[in-house]
Image (cartoon, rainbow, N blue to C red):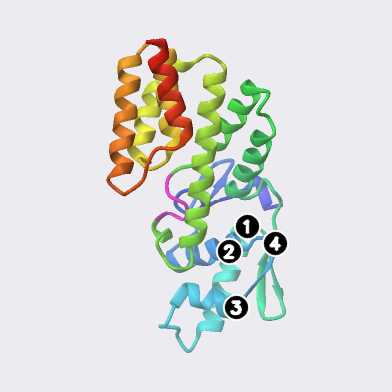
Amino acid sequence: MLRDGRMIRVLGPIDIATPEGELSVGGRHARALLGALASGVNHAVPIDHLEEVLWADDRPASADNTLQSYVSHLRGLLGADSIVRVDHSYQLNVGPADIDALRFEALLVEAAALEEMPEERFRRCREALRLWRGRPFGDLADDEAFKLETYRLEEMRLTAMEYSLEAELALDRHELIVGELESAVREHPYHERLWYLLIEALARSGRRVEALREVANVRRILGDVGLQVGNDIAELERRVLDDA
């Protein structure tokens, strides 16, 4: 556990949350080091890898000593026992509530098991989504060291959005979520499940013409990249037409 109830945050710009407010980690190298340790949390991360994350092909002759100074700086922010040396590696030791990404993943696992309890699933998802403040790792998201983890976390965020919206449909809140779904499909135009939920919400709200228009939209968008809509949307379109 980190000292003073602190939390490492990577679901947005890398920083540390404290009971008194946001605490800056420091410059780009310090943030990259914390991001790399957080990505490999509770596992030994080789020093060679950490130095590559910080300096890539421009590693200074003093890299080992400079890395040690950054580790000491982070220990001062997080607690003396938060980062330990393991052979030729460093390891960030924290609990499941000490990193926002870990907390997010735990909430998503809980939500996945609550399909038959939509109100509880909705609450877990909204709590999970409130942890997000922007792209994972902030300005480091597109660095080679963080690309895959950024993609993985963003896919999980999309799953949390889906679970939340599905739960609201199950709770007959279809009229309330149309706007959110319209924004979601514009942001993720190739994600069929979001289109399905939008069409379903419109149809349940008595807006069948608009629902069929969105079917046409998703067909056009997917068709532009050589894809066809799946069976779920095709079957939903038939149901909307039958109810017209």
Q: Nearer the viewer, residue 92 or 173?
A: 173
Q: Are marks 2 and 4 in contact (CB under 8 Å)?
A: no
**Mark nearer the N terminus (3 vs 4):** 4
Highlighted range, magenta: 134-138
- Which residue type carries mark 1? Leu
Circle 4 sits on which residue? Answer: 42
Where residue 14 appears, as percent x and y from the top left, is 48, 54
Sequence-wise, which precedes: disc 1 or disc 4? 4
Q: CA distance from mark 3 to mark 4?
A: 15 Å
Q: Secondary structure at mark 3?
A: helix
Q: Which residue is mark 3?
A: 47
N-terminal-most mark, 1 or 3: 3
Marks 2 and 3 sit apart, C-alpha to C-alpha, by: 15 Å
Where residue 74 is drawn, which disc sits there?
2
In this view, the residue in front, 29 or 171, is 171
Please rate how many residues cluster around mark 3, counting C-alpha atoms within 10 Å: few if below 14, some from 14 to 19, many from 20: many
Query: Amino acid type of disc 2?
Result: Leu
In the rendered image, which quarter contains the C terminus? Answer: top left
Depth check, mark 1 against mark 4: the one in front is 4
Whole-number angstrom distance, CA of label 1 to CA of label 2: 6 Å
Q: Secondary structure at mark 2?
A: helix
Residue 137 among those drawn in magenta: yes
